[in-house]
Image (cartoon, helix red, strand yellow):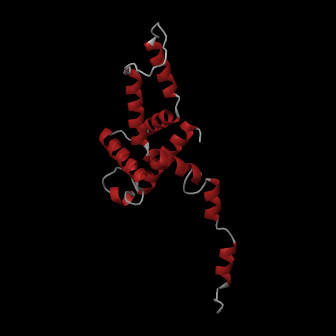
Amino acid sequence: MEKKIVSPKAEQRTKEKSPSCEQHERGRGKYRIDWDSRVIVLKYVRKYEEYKAWLAEERKRIMEPSPAQIDGMPHGTTPGDMTAAAVEALERLELHQRARIVRAITVAREQIGADIPDEKEREKLRNAIWLSCQNGKRHNFDAFAGRVACERTKFYYYKNSFLLEIKNILGI
């Protein structure tokens, strides 16, 4: 086998960690949250519509009483308090992890671009950041350049603030 000729500087770079990697591991580099939390939060954002639909279906199921099932088992002679049971079930549902995720994302989404006075521009920015979170390679800043009222650094600042807000609300 031939030995590859490598410059001393290149060899040294491969042996040492670059400062950007160390900053990235500590969460102080390009992103203000650590990489693992960022991945988890982005997965939650991508599943938001699914979780929201599940939550609506569960609420509907709780609020609409189901017909009595004929299963051959003895049942009580007095009717239960359907309203109290529904309230308890709704309270349990609101404590569910998916419900917490939906609430956190909804709150954080409303806070995107809160410092932008124009409502239309703020909504454009929210939609751009939302699409960027859904598929960052396809919907990066270049896809929205000229359509949103901010520059690249500010766009990613808003996106990272959005993800950080979700992380903080969920306590990740």
Tell me residue 164's x, y (percent).
53, 44
* Residue placed most toward the observer, 131 or 27: 131
Q: Is residue 115 visible?
A: no
Q: Is residue 32 left or right of residue 121?
A: right
Tell me residue 55's x, y (percent).
42, 33
Q: Is residue 48 left or right of residue 167?
A: left
Q: Quadrant of the C terminus?
A: top right
Q: Is residue 125 visible?
A: yes
Going 30% across and 41% down the picture, which residue do you hit? 120
Q: Quadrant of residue 59?
A: top left
Tell me residue 141's x, y (percent).
39, 57
Going 45% across and 47% down the picture, which residue do you hit? 158
Instruction: Single out the residue that lies furthest toward the top.
Output: 78
Q: Is residue 76 left or right of residue 130?
A: right
* Residue placed most toward the observer, 97 or 37: 97
Q: Is residue 51 left or right of residue 171?
A: left
* Residue placed most toward the observer, 156 or 5: 5
Going 49% across and 10% down the picture, which residue do you hit? 76
Seen in the picture, residue 54 relative to 43 is either above or below; the reply is above
Seen in the picture, residue 64 relative to 80 is either above or below; the reply is below
How many circles with numbers are drawn on the protein? 0
Seen in the picture, residue 3 relative to 137 is either above or below; the reply is below
Instruction: Single out the residue that lies furthest toward the bottom.
Output: 2
Q: Quadrant of residue 17?
A: bottom right
Instruction: Single out the residue that lies furthest toward the front.
Output: 72
